[in-house]
Image (cartoon, rainbow, N blue to C red):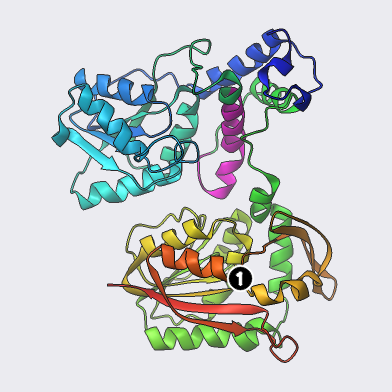
Amino acid sequence: MNSLTDYFSNSERSANKMQNEEINSLAKIIWEYHHMNYQLEKADCIFVLGSQDTRVAEYAADLFLQGYAPYILFSGGAGKFTKDIFKKSEAEVFADIALKKAVPKEKIIIENKSTNTGDNIRFSKVLLQELHFYFNNFILVQKPYMERRTYAAFKKLWPEKSFIVTSPQISFENYPTEEISKERMINIMVGDLQRIKEYPALGYQITQDIPESVWQAYEKLVGAGFTECLVKDQEKVLYNEKLGNEWIEWVEKDNSKGSREQEIFPLIKKWLSDVKPENLLDIGCGQGVCSTIIDETISYVGVDPSSVLIERAQKLYNSSNRKFIVGDALALPIENKAFKAEMSIWVWSHLQDLETASKEMFRTLLPGGTFLIITANPDTYEERKTFYKLYEENNGLLVGTFDLGEGNQLTDSTLYLHSKEYIKESIKSSGLVIDSFDKLGQLQDYPKGLYIAIQGHRTE
């Protein structure tokens, strides 16, 4: 290869003539930064994070056979890169490799539901508790270029445990394979570095210093076209500080005649009066305004991806029966079967993946628990578009400036144009049962209803 364009399947993707040697040099800077360089030491359990790279499983099995820990845990479901490659979950594929290397079956623990690093940790934590394993220290085994991100996530999500991080001892030059090309590897490394910088604000990881030379390498590689695995702007928009502050300013204005006070709050109160839950999870709680109508006898937890909104909620509404935490509807920082009731108000129209959101609701609801979802009504999408000053619409996603009236607006507000069929099927596919699916919202002006209110339950 003589130029940067040799890295790409389509040479027109980059007009930059940066030489191959410089690409390698920049990528190696990031490669080295991702390594934590821990010295191996014995632990209670080897915790292996799944992926498409089966060399991770082989290395972890070797560590077990060398006596570094008495148990080995494989964690991973069907990931973005493996769902079309493996016929089993990542954890089960990795466990099969360990068994072939003579790791005893009774020493293997399998967590096969997680689809991201946060879930690897959260789901495994719950599984170990259910199995009555009480490990105090771990050897975390991951791909070489994901050591640091794994370290940061584990420190954030399970800080009371001790651990070291390691990976297969493979050089940058020898890591690529037929399945994992160098182009792919560099794209993933660049994407992981972006997440190391941005995810702490979302509550996913601890903050880590990024040396200037490392960030400069990142910027040059992004400029050269290595952008395939970056978090897209529409995925970040909910966490935007400006949007959070705009939302705070609008919500905290007097809105006594608005739909929230006139329709949404009364519905929530009636629902809670009917189901009488001991505790309630509010998914996408914003700055916690819904907590103000919750009876003090109910233990309330609000979760939102915006640290700006959570900080505001903690300032305004913290009390003995209210708790606010940063978290994502697609990876709730909540244990299995934890809540008697869950609600998600004005959130689902901002989520692309409703299947995962439904599965998370199912996972965290107690059997027999109930849920309430209020989201945009697909029957009035065209009317809703008139509320935007400017917007762009691509592949079922509308992004634009939402006019709140009286001089207020939401910059880069998102609206996923989900169909009713997709909303219903996403809920049903998770195992949840829909009890009612009703129109709601300014019916005098919009007879079809601006919203739909969905009530249902998890079966026993």
Q: Which residues are magenta?
A: 186-206
Q: Is residue 195 magenta?
A: yes
- Residue 442 position, x and y percent, is 70, 86
Q: Can residue 123 be seen in the rendering of this structure?
A: yes
Q: Residues within 10 Å of mark 1 (few under 14, many from 20)?
A: some
Q: For numbered disc 1, what is the local secondary structure?
A: loop
Using residue 318 as the reference point, say whether residue 239 is left or right of it.
Answer: right
| Location of residue 275 (image quadrant) | bottom left
Q: In the drawing, does residue 406 fall left or right of residue 460? A: right
Q: Looking at this view, is 224 or 124 the one in front?
A: 224
Q: Position of residue 235 (x, y in %)?
A: 64, 49
Q: Is residue 286 visible?
A: no
- Residue at 61% from the left image edge and 70% from the top image edge: 346
Q: Tell me if residue 302 comes above or below residue 265 in the rendering.
A: above
Amino acid of disc 1: Trp
Above or below for 115 versus 192: below
Residue that carries the numbered disc 1 in the rendered image: 346
**Which residue appears at 48% of the width and 21% of the height?**
35
Quadrant housing the C terminus: bottom left
Q: Is residue 187 magenta?
A: yes
Nearer the observer, 71 or 135: 71
Across and down, in percent, residue 455 comes to 47, 79
In the displayed structure, 30 sits above or below 451; it is above
Q: Quadrant of the N terminus?
A: top right
> Residue 89 or 141: which is nearer the viewer?
89
Q: In the drawing, does residue 111 fall left or right of residue 342?
A: left
Q: Residue furthest bottom?
A: 444
**For the point 51% across and 82% down, which residue is it?**
268
Q: Main secondary structure of the magenta part?
A: helix
Q: Position of residue 100 (x, y in %)?
A: 22, 24
Which image quarter: residue 365? bottom left
